Image: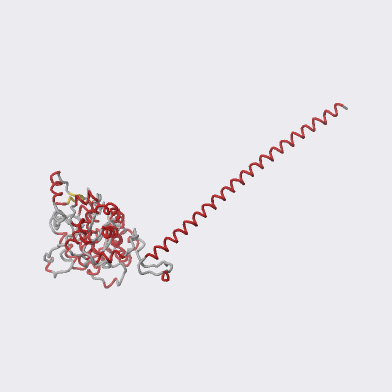
Amino acid sequence: RLQQELLNRSSLESQTLGLMEEVSCLKLKLGNMEEKHINSDRRIEELTLLLSQFRQMNDILTLGVFVLRMKRPGVLSDDIEPIQFKRGGFRATAGPRLTRAPDSGRSSRAHTSFSKWTTEQVCGWLEDSGLGQYVSLARQWVDSGQTLLSATPQELEKEICIKHPLHRKKLQLALRAFSNKTMEKSSELDHIWVTRWLDDIGLPQYKDQFYESKVDGRMLQYLTVNDLLFLKVTSQLHHLSIKCAIHVLHVNKFNPNCLRRRPGDENKTSPSEVVQWSNHRVMEWLRSVDLAEYAPNLRGSGVHGGLIILEPRFHSETLAMLLNIPPQKTLLRRHLATNFNTLVGPQAQQEKQEFVNASGHAPLTTTAKVRPKKLGFTHFRQLRKLRMDESADYICPMDTGNPPALSGTPKRPYGSFRGISPILARDSDRLEQVGSKN
């Protein structure tokens, strides 16, 4: 009997141990579940807090917009309506499009001489011109518009820290226009328009550099070779593209809508129309002559109607290279040459051929680079003493002159223009044109 009781007791103890193990496991699971519950509660609290903060910020922004609209002159509270999205404004490829909203300061500045502008009017004008980063220092230094008119380039660099050479040039050109009281048509084209213009001439890869340098229409008119090199435009073909495009602007008196983007009747095109074609319009022409598969290769090439018509070294072979048409496809290249000659017309075709036959002709390649001539230390000292006009080597001279047209042909609006080719360059010793080894 004693042995039986011992056996029963041992079995009870083993059962007790098993139950205790199960209880400990259950407690552990319960602890884990409580921890997860606590974490989920904490996460819910954090999300609730973030949501409340977001709602507060949204309310503050809505109130701020409402107050700004109420402060805008000429706007009543009853006239405020929600702004709707509108198509047809800036193009999608226009790059940066945020500009300072027009204010009443512009109207007050328009009726006052620049020399009599107040400090705030001058600062507002700087901001409208895209030079807002210099407003804080200008507000401390400028007493009136006369302060800027009488300042030297060294004083501008010292007092308002304009280190960027093209920002300094932009300001000097504007001040010179105010001083001479001559407002050129090119001054109406701002730096945002120039980014859209780069799209139109097929050079969108330079939009960031032009936008950061705040290049506007007036600066295009006075753009030099060194300015383009500073903007990282080193390709000779791209220099020619910009030069021809600026000349088209000159002839059209800087009309912002002079370039044609939409296709018309392909059978009724004349060279005077082709010269105003945009890069997109040239691609549409390629599609119309059954070369649609090669048309996308012109993106970023700088090819537009002005370059095709005005540059004497631009031939069908140059276009074939840019389109990446293999040399062995002779029939395709012959088809392109036939349509190209029809496009440019017999007069431009004859001028291009005469240029090819002239002595010293260097063919236009896609790899040629433009570099400035190396200057010694004494040259730099002389350049610092020169004024803007004396040292300028404009990429497209404003005084193109009126040389007689080739072959006794009558004078045309574009007849006095030639590209920066070796035998026709305005000042060829300023440039060192470096081509490929081929």
Q: Name the image colouring.
A: secondary structure
Furthest-right residue in this view? 1
Percent x, y of residue 305: 25, 64
Between 338 and 70, the one lying in front of the other is 70
Which residue: 66% across, 39% down? 28
- Asked if residue 82 lies left or right of residue 188, the reply is right
- The image position of residue 437, as x and y in percent, is 22, 48
Seen in the image, is 294 located left or right of residue 45? left
**In the rendering, at what x and y percent does residue 243 appear?**
21, 59
Q: Quadrant of residue 93?
A: bottom left
Q: How many marks?
A: 0
Residue nearest the viewer, comparing 305 with 195 = 195
Q: Is residue 39 above or below residue 276?
A: above
Q: Is residue 432 above or below residue 63?
A: above
Res 438 seen here: no
Task: Point out the image quarter for the N terminus.
Answer: top right
Residue 13, image x, y percentages: 78, 32
Q: Residue furthest top?
A: 2
Camera-nearest residue between 93 and 168: 168
Q: Tell me, yes or no, if residue 280 can be seen here.
A: yes
Q: Left or right of 356: which side holds 208?
A: right
